[in-house]
Image (tube, helix red, strand yellow):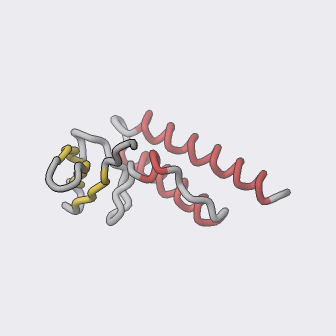
Amino acid sequence: MSREETRRIALERIHILFRLADEVFPENPERAQRYIDLARRIAMRCRVKLPRELRRRICKYCKSLLRPGVNCRVRVRQRREPHIVVTCFNCGRVSRYPIRRKG
């Protein structure tokens, strides 16, 4: 099996696990966290980066699945450079993501 094929299969599985985690989170947050852990492990084993939209849905510090309004707070700030501030309620850590302007 080629490296590209392995990468493609790994990314498909990661997307499936994130979708399953979203579906099951309201009833069973522990199972959703297990799916996220599996997706991260697949990415590490196959040496594939998680896509940015999925990476930002995981807390960088406690590795928990972030659901805005449930276990994290999302704010948009304008100071200096505009950025998004995500506060995790599990560990209390703050992540900041810059908002890039086009042009």
Is the N terminus in the top left, top right, bottom left or bottom right quadrant? bottom right
Name the residue nearer the viewer: 75 or 25.
Answer: 75
As drawn, is 4 to the left or to the right of 71?
right
Residue most extreme to the front = 103
Is the C terminus in the top left, top right, bottom left or bottom right quadrant? top left
In this view, 93 is above or below 86: below
In this view, 19 is above or below 45: above
Q: Position of residue 98 (x, y in %)?
A: 31, 53
Q: Residue at x 48, y 57 (%)?
A: 37
Instruction: Name the quadrant containing residue 68.
Output: top left
Residue most extreme to the right = 1
Residue most extreme to the left = 79
As drawn, is 18 to the left or to the right of 78?
right
Q: Position of residue 32 (x, y in %)?
A: 43, 46
Instruction: Name the quadrant containing residue 96.
Output: bottom left
Q: Residue at x 24, y 41 (%)?
A: 70
Q: Position of residue 10 (x, y in %)?
A: 66, 52
In this view, 76 is above or below 39: above
- The number of numbered discs placed on residues in the rendered structure image is 0
Name the residue nearer the viewer: 68 or 98.
Answer: 98
Q: Residue at x 22, y 60 (%)?
A: 94
Name the residue nearer the viewer: 30 or 40.
Answer: 40
Q: Position of residue 6 (x, y in %)?
A: 75, 55
Q: Residue at x 35, y 36 (%)?
A: 27
Name the residue nearer the viewer: 35 or 74.
Answer: 74
